[in-house]
Amino acid sequence: GEEIREAFLNFYAERGHKRMASASLIPEDPTVLLTIAGMLPFKPVFLGQQERPAPRATSSQKCIRTNDIENVGRTARHHTFFEMLGNWSFGDYFKEEAIDWAWSLLTEVYGLDPDRFYATWFEGDASQGLEPDHGARDLWLRHLPPDHVLPGNAKDNFWEMGETGPCGPCSELHYDRIGGRNAAALVNQDDPDVLEIWNLVFMQFDKPEKDAEMIPLPRPSIDTGMGLERVSAILQGRHDNYDVDLLRKLIEASAHASNDDPDGDNNVSHRVIADHLRSAAFLVADGVQPSNEGRGYVLRRIMRRGMRHAHKIGNKDPLMHRLVPTLVESMGEHFTELRRAEASITEILRLEETRFKETLDRGLRLLGEETDRLGEGEALPGAVAFRLYDTFGFPLDLTADILRGQG
């Protein structure tokens, strides 16, 4: 994983991009709670509110998303913490360079099979007065046969920052893990073996107001994003993001500390612990403290969900803080803030887990008593869920997670 990240950053640095350190998970944008995408730190640049840091930039941005937290650990590709590899042109180069360089990196540097790739392009949308992006289509046809260059609708192939602001068509690159077939019909169909790995956004319009007509930008720009965990799984021959080295080390450390098998009956719990440890550690390193509101509550939710899984697999004493050295060893060379904050991360995790354990058993007893009263398929009363939150500190998604585990 470290080598894959470094190869990406070096590739673009050699092509005139300024290497940028990952921005904080606490964004400057007051409308967003946490950094959720690689382009977010550059939003003021795209909006013309801030001078560009350089004509070209590249970074591996740490991101946190909790909208699918209930799927973390249960699926191959859901995380709360992930890295977004990206390259940007702020009014400098445009589609040709973006496409040619992406192709060169994937096929020449990473050595992926060219025959397994499919590229999508924006087919246009008459209802919004948007023309087809034939320019992107023709550029992809220089690298791929026509049946691997596919039109896409506005949902998949037109990117917007929000209801207003810069926007434009995009091209997604999809990779067929199996190969030796035509998998065009499986693109964007949630097939586990045909994965989107990179999105190239061609920012060429501005929407000044909601529902207003889009106007061409005077200096079109490029914004790309590729998930490190996903491309690492492909390059490391894994079908599951949790099997890549960056996460596998933490899963094995969790299992070892719990005297357990990392791939046994508790494998989902070890995956949750690994993912949530990464999120919690990086949030603390960026200055977030556990609390009952805002970012602090997001941190507490993530911590407590991981701590409940540690308790579930039989740990009587706090576990997560003991895994911090493994995380720092794995990611601390690139993200030096982890090394600087290691002592603080360890102590906050230890204190939070110690406090939560005092109420966890009592809350679980109450939940057990209440579920024993329920009939087949009957829902848990909202009043009980609120009491678990208000009295025992159970976030709602933690209660839902426990109930889901009971069927």
Image (cartoon, helix red, strand yellow):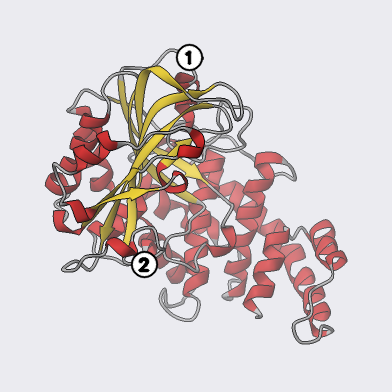
SS at circle 1: loop
Q: Does residue 237 sit above or below 226 in this rendering?
A: below
In the image as oriented, which residue stretches furthest toward the front?
Answer: 126
Task: Evaluate if marks 1 and 2 touch, with contact meaning CB atoms under 8 Å apart.
Answer: no
Q: In this view, does 359 lie to the left or right of 276?
A: right
Q: Which residue is drawn at 25% across and 41% down?
A: 137
Residue that protrudes farthest toward the right in the picture? 383
Q: Nearer the viewer, residue 115 or 250?
A: 115
- Foreground pick, 147 / 1: 147
Tell me, for residue 349, which label it has, or none: none
Q: Residue 50 carries which label?
A: 1
Q: How far apart are marks 1 and 2 (CA)?
A: 40 Å
Foreground label between 1 and 2: 2
- Which secondary structure lies at badge 2? loop
Evaluate whether residue 75 shows in this view.
yes
**Quarter residue 379 falls in:** bottom right
Q: Is residue 72 above or below residue 122?
A: below
Q: In which quarter of the image is the C terminus?
A: bottom right
Residue 29 in picture, x, y percent from top left = 58, 27
Query: Along the horizontal axis of the image, is 331 left or right of 48?
Result: left
The x, y position of residue 101, in whole percent, is: 19, 36
| Label of residue 192 in the image | 2
Residue 398 falls left or right of residue 181 = right
Q: Which amino acid does label 2 sit on?
A: Pro
- Whether residue 199 appears in this view of the structure is no
Which percent across, then down, holds residue 288? 61, 38
Circle nearer the N terminus (1, 2): 1
Which amino acid type is marked by label 1? Gln
For residue 135, above or below residue 386: above
The picture places residue 244, in percent across and down from the top left corner, at: 32, 60
